Amino acid sequence: MGHTPGMRRRRSDPPLVAAARRGGVTDRRILAALAAVPRERFVPPLHRAEADLDRPIPITEGQTTSQPSLIALMLSALELTGEEKVLEIGTGYGYQAALLAHLAAEVHTIERFPRLASRARENLAACGLDRVHVAVGDGTRGLPEHAPFDAVVIAAAAAEVPPVLAEQVVEGGRVVAPVGSTGHQDVVVYAVRDGQLVPVRHLTGARFVPLVPEDDAED
Ligand code: SAH
């Protein structure tokens, strides 16, 4: 097999950087963010020993922190330069938000469980990343008070991207989201064109926890 630059593995790569490279991520800013964020701070203490493994890890409230190489692939599809204002829907323990803090100028994230949002705030603050804005609420409504965003990443699965996001993302901005049924989703990259969300490409298959609108919540 020939050498593919993106697949090249450096001896000094931290495990999650190596995993992201294997998953096809070549963007140096993403790889640097993965190296900079200690994932063990963003998983429950019981699971700390697994933090360097490229696997999803259960958090509280029956939720899951996603597989790091998948997060890296989704974030690379946002093509961030560092100037952007970004929204993440589905904060969990804050790992992806921490990566975003290294990749964008302004990061907003919204989580429906107040206890997860406060845990994420603590985890982010412990890493000196307290400029991330963590909101509690229903992300299917976006975050109109801080719109417009240059990019949005959704970390939970739905049958479709909440249409209201088209109004909260700038023209030419991107949305990356897992779309499909409960058991399997396609991670799709969208661009906003003439005020509409237009699918641009299919990134990969995935299995995310569901995006639950407020009306459906039973807690
Ligand atoms: N981004 C996280 C992944 C968290 S899992 C990480 O870095 O690992 C997805 C999260 O989405 C869960 O915490 C879940 O509670 C949250 N979620 C589900 N539906 C939501 C909604 N309508 N609004 C906001 N958050 C939601």
Image: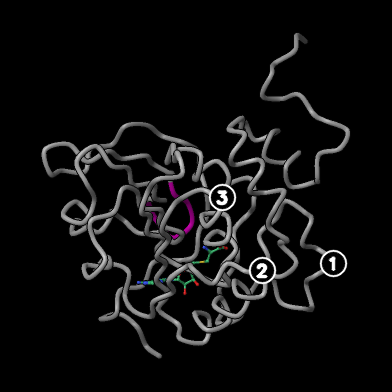
* Secondary-structure class at tag 2: loop
Question: Residue 86 occupies which quadrant of the picture?
Answer: bottom left
In the rendered image, which residue does mark 2 sit on?
A: 127
Residue at the spot of label 1: 49
Q: Is residue 81 left or right of residue 12?
A: left
> Where in the figure is residue 187, as x and y percent of width and height?
43, 44
Q: Earlier in the sequence, mark 1 or mark 2?
A: 1
Nearer-N-terminus badge (3/2): 3
Q: How is the image coloured?
A: one colour
Foreground: 190 or 63? 190
Q: Residue at x 25, y 59 (%)?
A: 162
Is residue 44 left or right of 148 when viewed as pictured? right
The structure residue drawn at horizontal position 39% and vertical position 65%, both measured from the top left corner, is 108
Q: Amino acid at mark 2?
A: Cys
Query: Residue 183, labelled with which disc?
Result: none
Q: Magenta segment range?
A: 180-185
Quadrant of image for the C terminus:
bottom left
Q: Is mark 3 within 8 Å of ligand 1?
A: yes
What is the CA distance from the residue labelled 3 to the residue labelled 1?
Answer: 20 Å
The amino acid pointed to by label 3 is Ile
Q: Is residue 158 above or below residue 125?
A: above
Q: Which mark is residue 71?
A: 3
